[in-house]
Amino acid sequence: MIYLDNAATTKPDEECLKKAEKYLYTDYYNPSAVYAGGYNLHKELASAKENIISTIADSENFGLIFTSCGTEADNQALFCGGKRGNVVTTLGEHSAIFAAANELKQRGLDVRFAPLNRDGSVNSDELVKLIDEKTSLVSVIHASNETGAINDINKIAAAVKAKNKYTLFHSDGVQAFGKFAFTLSRNIDLYSVSAHKIGGIKGCGALFKRKNLVLKPFIFGGGQESGLRSGTENVFAIKDFEFAALKRYAILDKAFAYVSELKKRLSDSLDKNVFRIISPANGSPYILTVSAVGLRGETLVHECDDKGLVIGNGAACSSNDKKRYSRVILACGQPESVADGVLRISFSPENSLEEVQKAAEILNFTAKNRKSIME
Ligand code: PLP
């Protein structure tokens, strides 16, 4: 099987799992317990936090709240940051933000959506125009999970603060963290990440938080995570996430160059009479979105699956969103015929060039075959 749906989830890194195993079998204490076993785990969580922060921020200015997933981190940012006035976000957000923003709207908040450029990045001039003195929060996705387009969040956050210095700036970094180099500037207040996109296990995420920012708790209870997110910590998943993040950041640039080559190889090998490239050339090398215009992406996903190639058709993580066309692809200005044929091929540094070459052959054969059946 050739697995090229790494933006949906990655295979858990075995070495990291082995290292974290002791937190399941021997060091299984509650980190809030006062005896030595518990206290030691409390310290282990603190070091996991420091280590994860150090990958993209400085721990003098940033703290971290562990969550159960990227979706929870996004919801915490939106529901705890977007409390009054209006909230500004984009039409290119993952449903973890988009649906939460619509819920805020239902609750009576004025929610404004900034339009996208053709490649899936936000039109930042239009975004800034939506901000006024009543804007409590702006949320902009860092790397689009649908096209791989990258928003320059440090630049956008600076423009947001220049318009209203009291507005909080959040970014959903789930498809950016561990994928390419960047550091969080001091204009960024909140930043969401998720473990299972970089070789960690599912069910673990985190929200970076600027230290002097006062937030209300999201989940009330025993007061874990400095009272901001109660619930006994999943030490195993958190330590596994720490190991996976450190491993990924140790090879970040090398992995970036390698995955760029994988993307180029696949993109170059696709038959351009059948496939149109949707992803921007300067987007994340981890995501290649194409459209088999006139065909149904979902049908091609099944047919490729039968031939041993696993790819996605848009946002697999919104599995209950059964709409035929991706709202993000339509918001890029693409017609329904293009949106219908969308396929998302996403890479990991563990994929080989041979796999990518074979994937191109399967894709070309499958799409041409389907096209001939339809003609
Ligand atoms: N944000 C983006 C951009 C994503 O791609 C995803 C998942 O695909 C999420 C948020 C949700 O992350 P999780 O699966 O950890 O809840």
Image: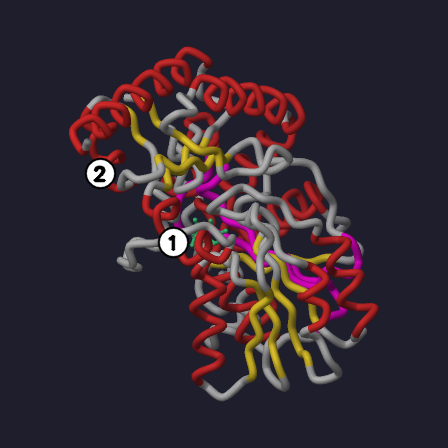
Q: Secondary structure at mark 1?
A: loop
- Residue 58's x, y, as percent? 77, 49
Specify start and end residues of the magenta stretch as a single range: 185-213
Q: Quick check: marks 2 and 1 in contact, CB under 8 Å? A: no
Residue 194 colored magenta?
yes
Is 208 left, or right, of 219 in this rendering?
A: right
Q: Amino acid at mark 1?
A: Ser
Q: Residue at x 21, y 23 (%)?
A: 369
Q: Residue at x 64, y 32 (%)?
A: 249
- Of callouts 2 and 1, which one flags the residue occurring earlier in the amino acid sequence? 2
| Residue located farthest toward the right when viewing the structure as drawn | 162
Is 45 left, or right, of 69 in this rendering?
A: right
Residue 331 visible, this angle = yes
Q: Residue at x 58, y 57 (%)?
A: 116
Q: Residue at x 62, y 56 (%)?
A: 122
Q: Give above or below for 98 relative to 268.
A: below
- Residue 118's x, y, as percent? 56, 49
